[in-house]
Image (cartoon, helix red, strand yellow):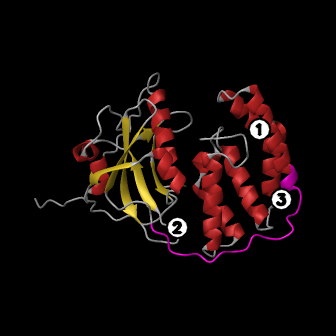
Amino acid sequence: MGAWSTAIASNDTYADFYSEFIDLYNEGMDVPEITKKLIRENQDTINDPDDGSNFWFALAKAQWDYKQLEPSILEKVTTIIKSGADTTSWRDLGASEKDIEKRKEALDKFLVTLQTEKPKAKPRKKTVTTKPSFEKGDCLTFKLNNNNYGGVLVLESLDTNTGLNLIANTRLNQAEKPILKDFEETEVLILNHGNWTNKPEIKWVFPLTQKAEKDILIEKVGTLKIDKNYEYDAIDYRTGSFSNFINQAEMQSESEKTKSKPETILSIKSLIKKKSWKLW
């Protein structure tokens, strides 16, 4: 979930999907089209008992901001809040009773907002080309909570209005700072903690904010040559924030202390090298 307070918008999932909705709208897509696209492409999140509610909250707020809140979406959010499903998830994740009470207050206020028509729709903004934070082939390392080094590989860099990078998380989790060979020889991080079922941790990432760059302390180790080209496709690779890579690496590592690692194996080499044909 990656929550930093009890406020509705204060978690990675909400922030990611709300931001994606706004970006798509500013690119020229209509609200119903965006809604169908996000629901179609993010079933893993929607079916996650800990994160599904945040998806629906972001969707509802974005629709409300554009004065196009669909009755079915409002009904979905109302059911989540009235049933207590969201606060139950917080309790299951270990939140204190004080925080749960604050969360409940935030949910009630949020529902009142959605039930009140917004006076004026949020305007569509003209988009500008944004450069992505990283270059194709960049090998990036960062510190995990256990003080080990984790790492990700940038598979693609797109100079679009959103400045997307396609990034693969890896199984690097070591005391020594990784070198290029470590990146080339490692595997992609496959998630099977919680409700994840052997999902490769590869996703499109928006440019980092200055605060995120300062907080995460990312260091470039070097660059690997990537022969493959990747086009934007949120069906195969969802969108998200860079901080989620660190969260997922730590949660998967913690899970593997009591649960077997995924049987699925996906090497970094398979993502960067084109298949070569042999003549027999």
Q: Residues within 10 Å of mark 2 (few under 14, many from 20)?
A: many
Viewer-proximal residue among 128 and 259:
128
Q: Does label 1 or label 3 sit earlier along the sequence?
A: 3
The reply to whether discs 3 and 2 touch (Cβ–Cβ < 8 Å) is no
Q: Quadrant of residue 224 in the image?
A: bottom left
Q: Report if residue 208 is visible in the image.
A: yes
x and y percent of residue 244 in the render? 51, 45
Residue 279 falls left or right of residue 102: left
- Horizontal side of 156 relative to 113 (left or right) equals left
Magenta stretch? 112-131
Q: Secondary structure at mark 3?
A: helix
* CA–CA distance in space, label 1 to label 3: 24 Å
**Residue receiving disc 3:** 71
Label 2: element kind? loop
Q: Tell me the CA gap for discs 1 and 2.
A: 31 Å
The main secondary structure of the magenta stretch is loop
For this rendering, which residue is in front, 147 or 202? 147
Could you say whether the residue bearing mark 1 is in a helix, strand or loop? helix
Q: Amino acid at mark 2?
A: Thr
- The residue labelled by disc 1 is 103
Residue bearing mark 2? 162
Magenta span includes 53? no
Q: Earlier in the sequence, mark 1 or mark 2?
A: 1
Across and down, in percent, residue 229 comes to 34, 65
Q: Pointer 3: residues within 10 angstroms few (<14), some, or many (20+)?
A: few
Residue 111 in the image, given as x and y percentages of width and height: 84, 49
Which residue is rendered at x = 60% and y = 50% of the image?
43
**Amino acid carrying mark 1 in the image:** Arg
Query: How far from the left and from the top, in percent, is residue 81?
Result: 81, 42
- Nearest-to-viewer mark from 3 and 2: 2
